[in-house]
Amino acid sequence: MAATSLASKPFLRSDVGSSLGFQASELRGLPPPSGQISIQRHTRPSRRLEVKAVGNVFGNYFRVATYGESHGGGVGCTISGCPPRLPLSEADMQVELDRRRPGQSRITTPRKETDTCKIFSGVSEGMTTGTPIHVFVPNTDQRGHDYKEMSMAYRPSHADATYDWKYGLRSVQGGGRSSARETIGRVAAGAVAKKILKMRTGTEILAYVSRVHQVELPEGVIDNETVTFDQIESNIVRCPDPEYAQKMIDAIDAVRVRGDSVGGIVTCIARNVPRGLGSPVFDKLEADLAKAALSLPATKGFEFGSGFAGTLLTGSEHNDEFYTDANGNIRTRTNRSGGIQGGISNGETIYMRIGFKPTSTIGKKQNTVTRDRHETELIARGRHDPCVVPRAVPMVEAMVALVLVDQLMAHLAQCEMFPVNPAFQDSIHPAVHEPFLVPKLS
């Protein structure tokens, strides 16, 4: 509260007098007011700029929040925006989580986790209720003592240092949120997204390993229009060609026994994606896919369609010419666009490639510094993948599914609010024709 004496201050400002219909000069000859008028002002607390920098939620309509750390009590996710009356069980998620889990072969981390999921909410009698779906997976094979040296020294090219620099502290055991165990929540949510896409649009998403270190699948060996899930899952490296799969496995084994690591590339395809997905200009479909893929741990590059190789072609060489197929549909004879033009899906197969770096935590001596800025040497302990790409396959599929289902919901909400223009648009009809199960009233 403050008291202001009008006798000691100008009675009226000129601009105030003008706004009242007279000039302040007309009042200058008047005596000042006697006494004092106390003007009470309630002090307010100072406003602070608050920035909600969450970074743990993905999606606009189909929203996924992941939580948990590598060596905490568990990890999981909360899914908001899932449509009601979708048949869903823990088994739907477990299939995908088993593909992601550690300890599944000699070329993955030896950490033993069953990654058994539990749905705590959002599902009743085998059907989604439209409310948030909470999924939890416990951690059961933590070894915090493996990280004693890493609690003092930074692992080269790992997130140890940058987490300290950003937050001022970090969860040392297992790398905390920077660990790939965070992706369990993504894969669980991706399983739900996959099921929605399959039932609503018949979309199929498949990923496979196309390169490990110097071993790369030659172009044309795999037909993205016909490759199958069983072909991909027929070996431990998840490469659909048996000959190159064995070469990749040998390449991983060679560095694994030396305590080193290698990187690689995961190719992902999405078939039978409806036309019209993508929201220019800032939410173009390829932009969302790039962000989704590059949010995964250890990613270093993203390209779709012809990618960087397309820069070596001329326009006449690169353009996908249109034609009309036997059913009267407009198609493209080639697919260098990768199923996306102008940020919008065109109905052709979407394909992309994601590059993963070699695992940064290795069993070889490296130079580094400690948290108190002393130079030292480090031989990292713990259980880590000699190559992340075999287990990255279901992670990539999950992130692509999350983008597509989110963009599908956006498209239906905006562009099919009213009847479509049949001259140009195709209405998105459910891919499954059997009626959804409706819970019986008790």
Image (spheres, helix red, strand yellow):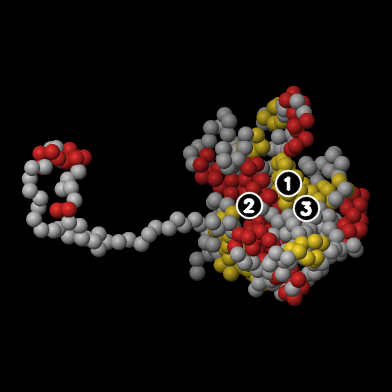
Q: Which label's residue is closer to the chain start, 1 or 3?
A: 1
Quarter of the rendering occupied by the N terminus:
bottom left
Circle number at residue 402: 2
Q: Report how far apart the C-alphas of labels 1 and 3 lie in the structure.
A: 9 Å
Calculate the distance from the C-alpha at mark 2 to the C-alpha at mark 3.
23 Å
Q: Is residue 248 above or below residue 366?
A: above
Which image quarter: residue 308?
A: top right
Which residue position holds label 1?
301
Marks 2 and 1 sit apart, C-alpha to C-alpha, by: 19 Å
Instruction: Give x and y (percent) for residue 291.
Output: 64, 48
Q: Dot 2: few (<14), some (14–19), or many (≥20) neighbours within 10 Å?
A: many
SS state under label 3: loop
Q: Secondary structure at mark 1?
A: strand
Which residue is tagged 3?
A: 357
- Look at 62% across and 34% down and name the residue there: 342
Q: Residues within 10 Å of mark 1 (few under 14, many from 20)?
A: some
Q: Could you tell whether 362 is left or right of 118 in the image?
A: right
